[in-house]
Amino acid sequence: MLSGRAETPTQSTILRLVRDEGPLSRVELGARLGVSRTTVAAEVGRLVELGLAQDAGPAASRGGRRSTMVDLDPGLRFVGIELGATSMRVAVTDGRLGVLARASTPKADIRRGPEPVLAEAIDVTRKLLAEQGVDRPAGVGIGVPGPVDFHGGVPVSPPIMPGWDGYPVRDALSRELGTPVLLDNDVNVMALGEQHTGVARSVDDFLFVKIGTGIGCGIVVQRHLYRGADGCAGDIGHIRIEPGGPVCACGNVGCLEAFFGGAALARDATAAARAGRSSVLADLLAGREALSAEDVGSALGAGDAVALDLVRVGGRRVGSVLASLVSFFNPGLIVIGGGVSRLGHPLLAEIRSVIYRQSLPLATGNLPVVLSELGDDAGVVGAARLISDAVYAAE
Amino acid sequence: MLSGRAETPTQSTILRLVRDEGPLSRVELGARLGVSRTTVAAEVGRLVELGLAQDAGPAASRGGRRSTMVDLDPGLRFVGIELGATSMRVAVTDGRLGVLARASTPKADIRRGPEPVLAEAIDVTRKLLAEQGVDRPAGVGIGVPGPVDFHGGVPVSPPIMPGWDGYPVRDALSRELGTPVLLDNDVNVMALGEQHTGVARSVDDFLFVKIGTGIGCGIVVQRHLYRGADGCAGDIGHIRIEPGGPVCACGNVGCLEAFFGGAALARDATAAARAGRSSVLADLLAGREALSAEDVGSALGAGDAVALDLVRVGGRRVGSVLASLVSFFNPGLIVIGGGVSRLGHPLLAEIRSVIYRQSLPLATGNLPVVLSELGDDAGVVGAARLISDAVYAAE
């Protein structure tokens, strides 16, 4: 399978219509686009040559000559890759971004640097494509856990990705995989995923808050990702919430993610276990060097009061930052995702309560604060969406 | 003078081109719009009938038949009104929003309620129009110091505007003045003013921060005002910065504007004068009930250390909130305006220093934080811009 990308605005509109609404007849496409039957035939013909669309049989008869249905090429494939601090996920999707197959590596570490990590990502991707019988996907989207120069396709001074600053991730992947690639922040692609198939489908302005090892936020304004003047919008993990406190990965003190998030939670739970403040946490720590955020989840499930307190205090801190952002941004929806969001209701309840208490009623009257519906798929679906938008759009 | 509004996208494009670039020949308009000479003639003819455009003499000869220049109608007039907590400003502008005349009332009080305040605004507007020989302006824009339902044209639960909640400001003014009216938040119209003729002319994404009696923020995303899901985006005066503190006009405690802004500054300066902490402030208070934010400016000019301290502590608080918003929004520019911004350099220096210290280098590397260039005109020019955009745009 070899495919190109849309070349004209008309091709672009045809692809988006059949992506979002399913197969459409040539007659209907002509009517919707306000162009002649000849133009539709020529543009669809070109899309078939490019491997993006195909004829999908005769349309239901409406009297007169039967029209032909047009659909996305059923062999069209996109790849979404999400690199987390300690995780790597890859998915292969069809043209409508339905996930056909996924793979993840159990122990990843972004700090190994770009070359070994990308080599592994390429390896996992190739295996997955081979299993699916795909020769070459139409494009690959990738999200990484740090600030990205979207136009340059490189990470920029990412605090938790030593060695990645300025590394040409987009171009290196594109060269190896022989297909167009786009690179973005992990949180941005997760926001796109929620917009594509998640809870944010029908919302114009929303925030996707990822609480993973660190904390970040994807911002959608009028259904488009907002990246900011330098591409680092949404970097809320480094908002200073207290004058002192633990040193953050970025080198400052007082940052939100130095107080809460997966890494901080693991640190605080380990300390509580060592200090003998929780027998449940101490039992979990037995024979190991440190606890993880997942262990806090287990302790929570066992009814441990110390674990609950850690989650509540953390939720209050996140809620307080989000309350400020609600006053400023007045979003229509806040989606909470990322690994730590699996702590579930106790965390969500605390975040909600602070937001509703600290923001003006006008901004919170219609503001749902919900957990991500997509879970682990948000990033890979969003990364596939990122590249599919570029493939479907004429430049 | 009686004028309508653009009726077609082509008319809209013609008006915007001659507004932004000055008079253009019909031949050039045809070429720029990709339409025939006949279409240009018909559309310009309609704009002349509507009182929006006029022929402006022959174009310079380029060989062949001379083309005719098209310009905005020189009699086209807009009105911008800005209501502050204690101020009222009105300006009459030409079609390019150059201010032809302005008026202000020395002692206004928004708390008198909508009927007397709007009656006075209408009175001031009518006098100004009469002085300018204008029968009816093409439209009126008005900004008020509180949250607004932009589509409904009414204030919504505005904390410092008792009696205004749900009052049909837009429709009442439109009926009285017999012309289209648009209502927005004062800070939003000030942001539009800065974008039209101020320091933000060439910036896509910026924040306009008004420090007046209260504190608010206008948000511009990709050159468009961002109003949020409920129209109350930018309400940063009610971000909670400390768990306790003075009670705010909104009823909560800990809000930024309960600590700083014109009202808080006047309160703190009066307390300092009464407590004998500053002889300069005490002298200013002699024989009066309370000091104002302007008095703090006078004391600052006289080198008073207590006044300087009030400004510095306040600047630090504003800076800390803005630092969070810089991490979240990554703007290309921050403009500081409103009455209290006249305290000038000591305030600006403190705000800047906190922003640069607390936000990530990537977001502050190219981030100018500057004082408004327009001063008192920002609101009225922006209000005129708001309605002119609607008059020039085909719906």
Image (cartoon, coloured by chain):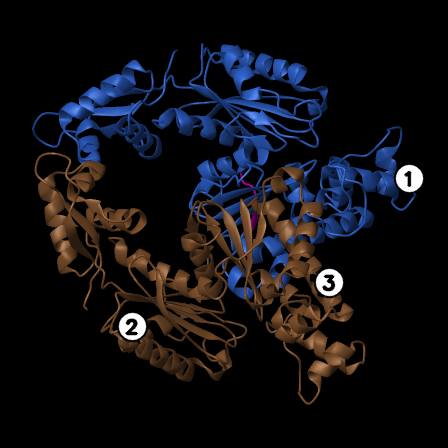
Chain colours: A blue, B brown
Q: Which residue appears at 61% of the width and 21% of the height? A: A167
Q: Is residue A299 above or below residue B322?
A: above
Q: Chain of mark 1?
A: A
Q: Residues within 10 Å of mark 3 (few under 14, many from 20)?
A: some
In this rendering, do the residues under marks 2 and 1 share a single chain? no
Q: Nearer the viewer, mark 2 or mark 1?
A: 2
Any part of residue A56 in sight? no
Q: Which residue, given by chain and number where applicable, does mark 3 sit on? A: B313
What's the residue type where badge 1 is placed?
Arg
Q: Which residue appears at 24% of the width and 72% of the height? A: B134
Q: Nearer the viewer, mark 3 or mark 2?
A: 3
Closest to the observer: B43 or A300? B43
Q: Is residue A143 above or below residue A313?
A: above
The range drawn in magenta is: A369-373
Instruction: Look at the numbered disc 1 and give the secondary structure of its residue.
Output: helix
Q: Which residue, given by chain and number where applicable, does mark 1 sit on? A: A274
* Magenta region includes residue A147: no
* Magenta-colored segment: predominant secondary structure: strand
Q: Chain of mark 3?
A: B
Residue B209: image x %, image y %? 55, 58
Q: Chain of mark 2?
A: B
Closest to the observer: A116 or A232? A232
What's the residue type where badge 2 is placed?
Ser
Any part of residue B338 in sight? yes
Q: Which residue, given by chain and number where applicable, does mark 2 sit on? A: B174
Instruction: Look at the numbered disc 3 and give the secondary structure of its residue.
Output: helix
What's the residue type where badge 3 is placed?
Val
